[in-house]
Amino acid sequence: MANKNNKKSPAQQAAEEAAAQQTPKVENPAVKTVVNGIKSGLSPDATVTALNGLKGMIHDNPNAAAYYNLSEDTIHSINVFTLTGFATVLAIEVHENKSPFAQMMLKNQVEAVNAISEFTGVAIDVKALPAPNEKGDVQIPSTAVKVSDDMKKKIAAEEKLEGVTNPAEVTSPEQLAASLTLLISRGNEGIIARMRRATDFYRGYLTIQANKAEDKKAALEEVKNKSYSDLLSEMAAVVGPCPVGLVGNAGLFRKNFVNVGTIIGPFCMYRRNADKIDTKGALTNDFIADLVRIMITWSCKEEISKAEKGIKENERIIKKKEEIVKENKDATEVNIAKTDIKTHKDYIEKCNNTINEMNGIVIGMNNPSIEDVDNLIDNFNKKDDTDADYKRAHLIVDQIINTYYKGTDLTKVDMDSLLHNVQQRAGIIVNLFRDPLSQSIAYSESNITEIAQAETPAEEQK
């Protein structure tokens, strides 16, 4: 059973989450009505329909296409955060809904869902769909939505969790893990707000335990001195596997870090979302960095876990095939068994490579190179726009500007002055992921300067 104090269905909560992931800039009353409808609470069926209205909102990341290897058409009207939330809604709806349902979507929304299916475990069978209408809408029957076995298992496992909303009611480590998982995975808040809520719950639990300690004063002081980052790291260890609500974004961020080669993109995306919900500035850069680190680590552990299970299963099969080779006198069966053994050994090798790759990602994330930051301005100013360093530099600069200098009229500021600050911001972010002893002293908040205004062209002065 799910949390008994949570009266909203998982599908409805996931839909509300998709809307809450970011505060959209609404350009027309129709879309505004849809967004408000989601926030006010709709039936599970209506949540999927309502989410389609989000196609009119302005997405938060203008470089999402490049960052996530998606086509411009796919990204055009769908923000990547909303997209993963939308895919989660579909997964839960298909898993939980006992009766068939049909859904209208834009054709490019279908393509977008399929583009990130490796992370969300949700795909739409385009062969099972009717032709789009004159507006480009296509009807999606629930039977055309395919949810992976892994995603089904995760949803089913969370449904069985017995969680509580009051830390004083926690009676066992298992119930603590269940409560934190549900707080992180479900609810109508964005990821950052849910993680903050979960860390508050965890601090409350630790405080209650400290009150029972022999040296009560020292125990309470220790809990009081724990930062949100400390709590976040401990909490992730307690929770274990990545909760359903975070699987898609965690996978996307992992892929982003690998493809682009910098941790700056994921950090900036979370920083922007934090700024929207945290008007008091309580969510520090350290907290955001640790959140990104944990999300990517969670994703890597998910892949490692799958690989380890694959190794065990294939080792079991190999043993059976080896018995056939050893005991069977039929040459044909022996040859087939030998071929099968090779196939399964190749798969095991692939799994081991995955494990090594995921471990490498975690190691690289925890000690990222500062080289891209040191060379940022030179690479940004290169003339060859096909150069990989040029592309990465422009992605980094765009992310920093969109996070820290959004709304700045680039035609009215001195670009050298702006790039100086952007480079400093980039260095500060990368330092957050480096060991304190290996952080570059060239980058700090004290080096951020007021951006100079562009000089007025001579022809305008006349």
Image (tube, grey):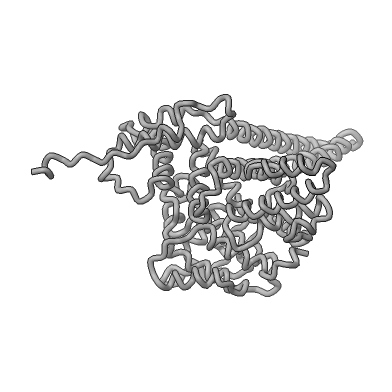
Quarter residue 75 falls in: bottom left
Residue that extends furthest to the right in the rendered view of this protein? 327
* Residue 155 pos. (x, y %): 71, 59
Q: Is residue 333 visible?
A: no
| Quadrant where the image shows the N terminus | bottom right
Residue that extends furthest to the left in the rendered view of this protein? 462
| Quadrant where the image shows the C terminus | top left
Q: Which residue corresponds to the image point at 73% horizontal and 36% vertical from the top-left?
A: 348
**446 to 90, vertically: above or below:** above
23 left or right, relative to 204: left
* Residue 365 pos. (x, y %): 58, 34
Q: Is residue 397 visible?
A: yes
Q: Which residue corresponds to the image point at 65% horizontal and 73% vertical from the top-left?
A: 100
Q: How many marks?
A: 0
153 left or right, relative to 53: right
* Residue 165 pos. (x, y %): 72, 61
* Residue 293 pos. (x, y %): 60, 40
Q: Which residue corresponds to the image point at 62% horizontal and 45% vertical from the top-left?
A: 295
Give 457 or 334, whichever is nearer the viewer. 457
Give 226 or 26, whichever is nearer the viewer. 226
226 left or right, relative to 79: right
Quarter residue 345 falls in: top right
Quarter residue 379 falls in: top left
Give 339 or 409, whichever is nearer the viewer. 409
1 left or right, relative to 70: right
Q: Which residue corresponds to the image point at 71% horizontal and 72% vertical from the top-left?
A: 98
